[in-house]
Image (cartoon, helix red, strand yellow):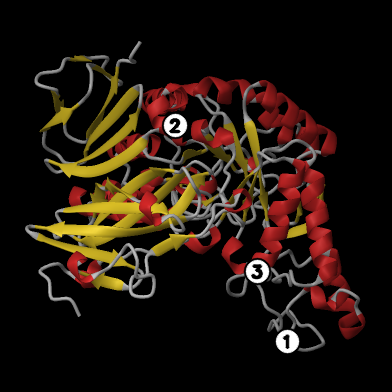
Amino acid sequence: MVKTAMDLRAILHIPHSNWAFALNPQEFEVRLRTAKDDVESVELVIGNQYIWNTRRPFAMERIGGDELYDYWRCLYHIDDPRLGYYFLLHKGEETLVYSEAGFARPETLDIDHDRDGFIHFQFPYINLNDVHRRPSWVEGAVFYQIFLDRFCNGDPSLDPEDKTPWGELPQVPSQYGGDLRGLIEKLDYLQELGVNALYLCPIFLARTNHKYDTVDYTQIDPHFGDEETFQELVDKAHEHGIRIMLDGVFNHCGLYFGPFQDVLKNGENSPYKDWFHIHNFPVTLDPTNFEGFAVGCGMPKLNTTNPGLREYLLGAVEKWTRFGIDAWRLDVADEVENTFWREFRNRVRAINPECLIIGECWWNAEPWLRGDIWDGVMNYAIQKACILHFAEDRMDATEFCGRVNECLMRNTRQANECMLNLLDSHDTPRFIRTCGGDKRRVRNAISFQYVFTGMPCTYYGTEIGLDGGMDPDCRRTFDWNEENWDRTMYDHVHTLMMLRRRSVALQTGDIRVQEQNGMVTVRRIAPLETVVAVINNTETEQTARISLPRSADEVFTGERMLLEDGEVTVTVPPMSARILVTNRMI
């Protein structure tokens, strides 16, 4: 074992993972983890592993850290895709070599000739089909989630008989009559707000208002409309520059799904008995003797290994994808086998090569995000950090920035760009409730959400101050009486949506997240533009010195920020944010 002042136990690199991956056939990103404030500098030595004299050293950049670690990165422009590499770690007068063989001092190795004694890291070849190719449109996507029954009632003839009056607080079984026609009528509103992508909760035939208990995967729920209306929605949304993402529920179905009803009736003689996970026959509902979603909710889990079921589900997926939709969000996706998802991806991308695939996974999803299963997930890891910092003051700015940096290191750059960044959803209390009604905190969290890497997603009604606790209260109806709207919140969301859509730095820029004077700073860096957000989630005014390449304008106040020795001084009032955008280079 090498004796050294460096903390070797903290150092980590894993080839063919989120620590080493191809962005495209010309670019290769390499990352390294070291103990916090330990290693002073790192070099990546890389070249063709078969022509070893091609290797060259490149300085790695320290791009962030958390409580325990520093994170380093180098972007290598590829001449030949058969790569071999190692790291040189520097601390004071000491240098160590880090390779797949472990740690050694340079003077003890014959790196040029001893292939048995020196085992470098390798990336044997960059095959185009192995590179995570994310849809090109995600970089400018501004999503808006809609619970269709609660958004707008455009066709009262479709209303359920036991309809709840619009605006009345929801109960578990409440149905209000929101439908596809109502959404079509509000496309102008969404376009003016700044939305260019819609995430729709399930719209297929089901017994409940939420439609996660699917009865028929091939039919639009008649309370929402029909296929003709759905096609009209897709076409008119596209005319408005708005993309459509459908919610697919393939982990489980509803009790009234036809094949499950056949199993209830015919037991072991049913041709569909292997479409489900049944423990014994006859099938009983109380107590249940079949596997279901969660605990006691009566939605049977689907056995997606069964060829008949698989073909039924994927046939439905192909049908709806051919309507021209742009994305799928996959419910409880981490509980479904990966062979199903790989076939799902192949079939969807065969119809629409630019179709985005978002999984629902509330935890670390890195194994699913390598380019062969999903593109991204609903980013609950960041949502939880936003709750702890912006809403509840249980995490200070330093810890928040560390948590964010750790989350960024979990995944490849492509996966980070495809994250659906949310503050709340149909499954959580609304963020304003989590903030105890303090709308300043909500606006701070939204400011972070819209400057962070990935795709911001606003839950319907957030922009007008819609409140709500846990399900079903978080699913209130949208209030279309503008006199009741919080115009300050609306203007804040609108400003950020439009900024996101026009800013090159926010769409494609590199990201740095760090604490300064008790505030969260997010820097987005593109060749022609830099955006820096400074978010003060304290009750006292704070000041920060921010380095910028050029003069800048502040987004919310319009203030002109002039450089002084390459920096600007930013004063941030209590519980507010300032976002600086540099002038474009001509």
Q: Residue at x 13, y 27 (%)?
A: 571
Image quadrant in which you'd find residue 151 = top right
Across and down, in percent, residue 177 comes to: 70, 40
Across and down, in percent, residue 230 comes to: 77, 35
Q: Residues within 10 Å of mark 2 (few under 14, many from 20)?
A: many
Name the amino acid type tagged 3.
Glu
Earlier along the polypeptide chain: callout 3 or callout 1?
A: 1
Q: Quadrant of the N terminus?
A: bottom left
Tag 1 secondary structure: loop
Tag 2 secondary structure: helix
Determine whether, in the image, residue 384 is placed left or right of residue 239: left
Name the amino acid type tagged 1.
His
Q: Which mark is residue 279?
A: 1
Q: Which mark is residue 507?
A: 2
Q: Compared with residue 436, is residue 585 higher up or lower down, i.e. above or below?
A: above
Determine whether, in the image, residue 122 is placed left or right of residue 320: left
Q: CA distance from mark 3 to mark 2?
A: 33 Å
Residue 411 visible in the displayed image: no
Which residue is identified by label 3?
Answer: 337
Q: Residues within 10 Å of mark 1 (few under 14, many from 20)?
A: few
Earlier along the polypeptide chain: callout 3 or callout 2?
A: 3
Q: CA distance from mark 3 to mark 1?
A: 19 Å
Determine whether, in the image, residue 71 is placed left or right of residue 75: left
Image quadrant in which you'd find residue 283 = bottom right
Residue mark closest to the camera, 2 vs 1: 2
Residue closest to the far top: 586
